[in-house]
Image (cartoon, rainbow, N blue to C red):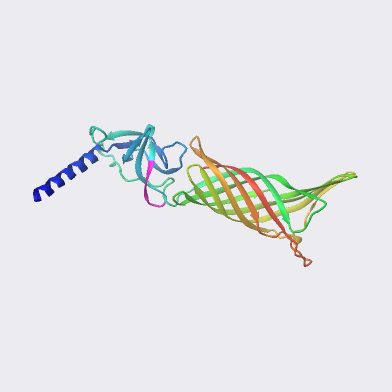
Amino acid sequence: MKKTILAVFVVMVFLATAAFADAAIIKVKVTSANIRQQPDATSAVISRAAQGTFFEVIKKSGNWYEVAVTDATGRTVTGFINADVVEEVGGGAGGAAAAPAPQRGAAAPSYAAPRAAGGGASAGKFVVMAGPVFSNIAFSESVDPWKKKMRFGLAAGVGYEMPVGKDLYATGAALFSTGGCNFTYSDASGSYKQSYIGNALALRLGIKYAFNGPFVTAGPYVGFLMSPKTSWSFPGGDSGELSIDTANVNTLLFGVLLGAGYEMNLGGLKGFVQLTYNLGLSNMAKNTGGGTSTAKPNSINIIFGIQL
């Protein structure tokens, strides 16, 4: 019995040693190599490895090596590194030469999993963004006989994105956006056009969940209405523009945003396109005369952005 147990133990040790010896060792040969979530060049980057970093290969899938890394939350996960940015230096089928010893005076190579992309769990990325905005105002009272339409404008700003978990990011952005809505009315005398114009500077906060390209996002926003005014063009050449007294308007805006988009690689940078609906919850109407009417701004943004 003892001899049988000893024999089994010896066989297990031999198999374990053989398996270890058969594992390939790769070394990063470029300045910085991306480690991706999936074996795909468009997949999300979960970590980066500096030149000279060694990895033990879990398995090879086509032109990709699966390796163990530490993600932004400090957990050990598996990722994929492209064969074009590494070289095999040991192990593999047939037990090739072992990883080379460092040269005299050189630092010993590190086999530790690299830190998360950007330098650690708290690392993030700055974002620049811009795109068209289609704004409107939801009135509680009828505007008949006028017809209300969206107003076309532009939005632009900067943001910051920080990983807080697997595929989960905290986001923040400061965005300048045009807003308002248009009114039209026609009768026998001609066409009447009137616009409410209100630009805003808003701070957006949110949570983004990304899954290998597509992503969804949601969160609150708060903003400040700047220089509200109205413009008109009536038959007979009557036209003009007039600033609105902010004593009659609530200039503090707030609401929630809901969005979805898609991320892609653009020559080493990550670009994205995002569709966002901004649901206004604040009432711009001050109702100084004691009324109860509401005027709540909302908009649809198409945002194009790049992570720096």
Residue 68, position as x, y percentages in the image? 34, 44
Residue 301, position as x, y percentages in the image? 63, 46
Tally of numbered tags = 0
Using the rendered view, name the quadrant where residue 131 is placed.
top right
Specify whether 63 is left or right of 288. Answer: left
Identify the residue at image location x=35%, y=40%.
66
Specify whether 212 is left or right of 245. Answer: left
Q: Is residue 259 magenta?
A: no
Image vertical order of residue 291 relative to residue 273, above or below: below
Using the rendered view, name the quadrant where residue 15 is placed.
top left
Extent of the magenta region: 73-79
Specify whether 104 is left or right of 264. Answer: left
Identify the residue at image location x=58%, y=44%.
274
Q: Is residue 75 magenta?
A: yes
The extreme front residue here reads: 1
Image vertical order of residue 234 relative to residue 225, above or below: above
User: In this view of the protein, which residue sits in the foreground, 242 or 80?
Assistant: 80
Residue 180, position as x, y percentages in the image? 72, 50
Residue 276, position as x, y percentages in the image? 61, 48
The extreme bottom residue here reads: 290
